[in-house]
Amino acid sequence: MCSFPRQSDSWVFDELYRAGKIELELVPQGNLACRIQAAGMGLGAVFTPTGFGTLLAEGKETRHIEGKDYVLEYPIKADFALIKAHQGDRWGNLVYNKSARNFGPIMAMAADVTIAQVSELVELGQLDPEHIITPGIFIQHVVAVDAANGTGAEQ
């Protein structure tokens, strides 16, 4: 799962896709977030208005609810999630910078195993509980990475 599989040097993806060894499903970013969040919340499926009446809705169940049309979208669950946070403690409580908090928390909820890379590993109790976005219950491994040289150690 990724938000942009095609780049100028994406020959590995191209080869696997053409060989039928990997699938590509185009999903609007809002629907992607909704489907990941639905998996993390344990929902069976969700209705969303995005994509109704377009090629993205072909073959999917639709409903007209209270005057508005919706498309049924199923959750996307992951075996593993690799996420990045600004700060974290050894229990996996995480604080993010800016847009890193968009997909990180919901991916942590939707994955069976989540590995969090943190720029700053802090002692237990150092994080302000009001700033923790992802609680440690969703994180199985924390890796502190030194931003200067890219090396890390698992905690």
Image (cartoon, rainbow, N blue to C red):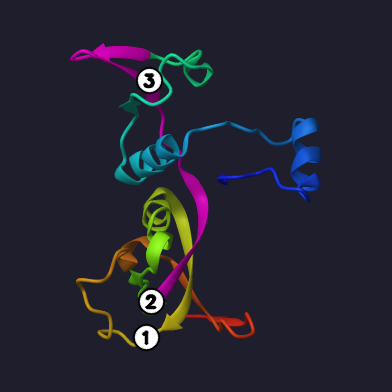
Q: Secondary structure at mark 3?
A: strand
| Residue kind at label 1, given as amino acid type | Val
Q: Position of residue 9 (x, y in %)?
A: 78, 51
Which residue is label 1 attached to?
122
Residue 78 drawn above or below residue 143: above
Q: Quadrant of residue 43?
A: top left
The three-letter amino acid code for the residue at tag 2 is Gly
Please state if 78 lies on the left or on the right of 132 as rendered.
right
Report the quarter where the N terminus lies. top right
97 inside magenta stretch = no
Q: Amino acid at mark 3?
A: Val
The answer for how far apart the CA atoms under marks 1 and 2 are is: 6 Å
Q: Which callout, 1 or 2, points at the residue further toward the start of the chain? A: 2
Residue 15 lies left or right of residue 120; in this view the side is right
**In the drawing, does residue 3 fall left or right of residue 137?**
right
Q: Is residue 13 above or below residue 83?
A: above
Task: Give the residue pinned by disc 3.
Answer: 71
The residue where tag 2 is placed is 88
